[in-house]
Image (cartoon, rainbow, N blue to C red):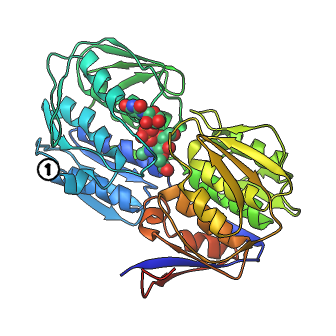
């Protein structure tokens, strides 16, 4: 059944909502479960299309997987290196992270290419180059990737870009093999620290996560029980903060921290929002129209403004007072939502990697289509500021990253519901 998210705009947000566990934190941790020879209990694991796909991959590799609410238990006592078909790997980008862990655990891996949001070219050259530098033999085939562990030797790997996925893949491969690996120019995202925390609990030696130089002493690990609580989803937290900045109102988010989203809260504060940490999480008050006009907002690797929040920021700016420019430096093509925002009446122009947004008084609801996860979330947020009804199609994209987005927004007082779309050709 095709679904859509329908928003009736015009209501300020008021209330309190809990922030889900991090998708991008949970996925590498689930892949890391392959390295342990016992049971890992992962709490605060968001139940999403992507995390479910990852647990299906683990099951296909012989792991026992049991979900109970937002806790998933993974029994990796026995892991076999079964080829992973496209039907599994194409469901998410992080399927490629399985490569490092599976190689380290079983010595070989065969998997079809990864999926994920279409944000322009998303090569995996840095993953493969890094694995090769650590002694793995990796072949790219017509079907995907086939690799053997080889005689892994501890080595220094210098990433030419601090890729999140490549850093995770190399940490996992290095953890399961002998010798010391040093990853230079590693990604510093908080999710990398979360992965390191899991690995340490599982008995591996990882130092420097969160800095640009990560050291992994391979060959540790134990066979016992590992318990890990996934970090709060900083991108979901930013989504709700942007929602309130755009629609105005006062909200409290529980279960999240300010530090990992500093670049976003600074931008929202500059626009006039009052934001503070509370005992339980964070509070945002946006009583006036958002003020655009600060310096260029440039996305970049952590701790810069996150690319994953760029689409939602465009929605905030769409009805702001003034004009703003946003440069997307991480992905080559992450402005698909701009054209849909224009359908809602936003004045957004893109040229190459820069979007220029001139705020308008109000948007007008209509039918729009999500083309990727965060772009879809941005359209729902824009709907909150639009007159009349905004109907967002492409809901499976949104469900990859949010546990029922409409429920959280409804808890914050928005008029948002999920409907079955009778006819997907309308519009
Ligand atoms: C992770 O993707 C996140 N996904 C993305 O979140 C996020 O946007 C991205 O990091 C950047 O923060 C997960 O964690 C599952 P990268 P990843 O490797 O690991 C280029 C969301 O909405 N690159 O840091 O794929 C690449 O093309 C998603 O939740 C290479 O050229 O990101 C891109 O331009 C979307 N070669 C840049 O680096 C490589 O081998 C950053 O990619 C790898 C990457």
Going 24% across and 36% down the picture, which residue do you hit? 99
Instruction: Spot the residue most to the right.
Output: 288
Q: Secondary structure at mark 1?
A: loop
Q: Residue 140 placed where, x, y %?
A: 19, 32
Residue 257: x, y in percent? 65, 46
Is 163 positioned to the left or the right of 295 in the image? Answer: left
Front position in the image: 420 or 214: 420
Q: Is residue 244 left or right of residue 93?
A: right
Place of residue 115 in the rendered image (x, y in percent of width and height, measured from the top left): 32, 50
Q: Nearer the viewer, residue 290 or 65?
A: 290
Q: Is 79 or 39 nearer to us in this picture? A: 79
Residue 133 occupies which quadrant of the picture? top left
Q: Quadrant of ligand 1?
A: top left
Q: Quadrant of the N terminus?
A: bottom left
| Residue ID for mark 1 | 62
Cβ of mark 1 under 8 A from ligand 1: no
Q: Residue at x 39, y 79 (%)?
A: 2
Q: Nearer the viewer, residue 331 or 212?
A: 331
Q: Residue at x 38, y 47 (%)?
A: 27
Indicate the quadrant where residue 351 lies. Answer: top right
Residue 385, x across and y down, in percent:
73, 70
Against 138, residue 343 (above or below) is below
Q: Quadrant of residue 96?
A: top left
Query: Can the viewer see residue 251?
Result: no
Q: Residue at x 27, y 13 (%)?
A: 179
Residue 418 makes an appearance in the image: yes
């Amino acid at each position: 059944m095709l679904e859509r998210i329908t928003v009736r705009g015009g209501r300020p947000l008021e209330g309190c909502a809990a922030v889900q566990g991090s998708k991008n934190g949970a996925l590498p941790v689930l892949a890391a479960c392959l390295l342990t020879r016992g049971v890992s209990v992962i709490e605060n694991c968001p139940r999403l299309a992507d995390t479910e796909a990852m647990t299906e991959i683990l099951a296909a590799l012989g792991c026992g997987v049991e979900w109970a609410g937002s806790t998933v238990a993974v029994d990796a006592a026995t892991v076999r290196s079964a080829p992973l078909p496209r039907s599994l790997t194409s469901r998410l980008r992080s399927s490629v992270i399985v490569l490092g862990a599976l190689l380290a655990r079983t010595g070989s891996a065969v998997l079809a290419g990864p999926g994920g949001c279409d944000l322009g070219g998303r090569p995996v050259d840095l993953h493969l180059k890094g694995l090769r530098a650590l002694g793995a033999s990796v072949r790219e085939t017509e079907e995907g990737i086939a690799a053997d562990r080889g005689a892994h030797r501890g080595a220094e790997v210098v990433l030419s870009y601090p890729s999140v996925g490549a850093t995770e893949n190399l940490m996992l491969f290095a953890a399961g093999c002998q010798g010391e690996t040093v990853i230079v120019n590693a990604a510093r995202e908080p999710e990398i620290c979360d992965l390191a925390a899991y690995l340490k609990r599982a008995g591996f030696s990882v130092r420097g996560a969160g800095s640009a130089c990560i050291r992994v002493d391979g060959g540790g690990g134990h066979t016992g029980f590992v318990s890990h609580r996934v970090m709060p989803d900083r991108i979901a937290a930013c989504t709700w903060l942007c929602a309130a900045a755009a629609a105005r109102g006062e909200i409290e988010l529980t279960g999240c921290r300010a530090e990992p989203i500093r670049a976003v809260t600074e931008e929202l504060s500059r626009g006039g929002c009052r934001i503070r940490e509370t005992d339980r999480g964070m509070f945002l008050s946006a009583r006036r129209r958002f003020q655009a006009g600060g310096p260029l907002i440039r996305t970049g690797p952590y701790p810069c403004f996150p690319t994953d929040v760029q689409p939602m920021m465009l929605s905030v700016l769409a009805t702001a007072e003034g004009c703003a420019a946003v440069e997307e430096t991480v992905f080559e093509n992450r402005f698909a939502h701009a054209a849909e925002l224009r359908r809602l009446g936003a004045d957004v122009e893109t040229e190459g990697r820069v979007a220029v947004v001139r705020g308008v008084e109000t948007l007008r609801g209509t039918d729009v289509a999500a083309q990727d996860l965060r772009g879809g979330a941005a359209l729902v947020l824009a709907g909150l500021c639009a007159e009349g009804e905004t109907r967002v199609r492409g809901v499976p994209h949104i469900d990859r990253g949010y546990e029922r987005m409409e429920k959280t927004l409804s808890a914050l007082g928005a008029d948002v519901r999920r409907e079955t779309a009778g006819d997907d050709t309308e519009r």
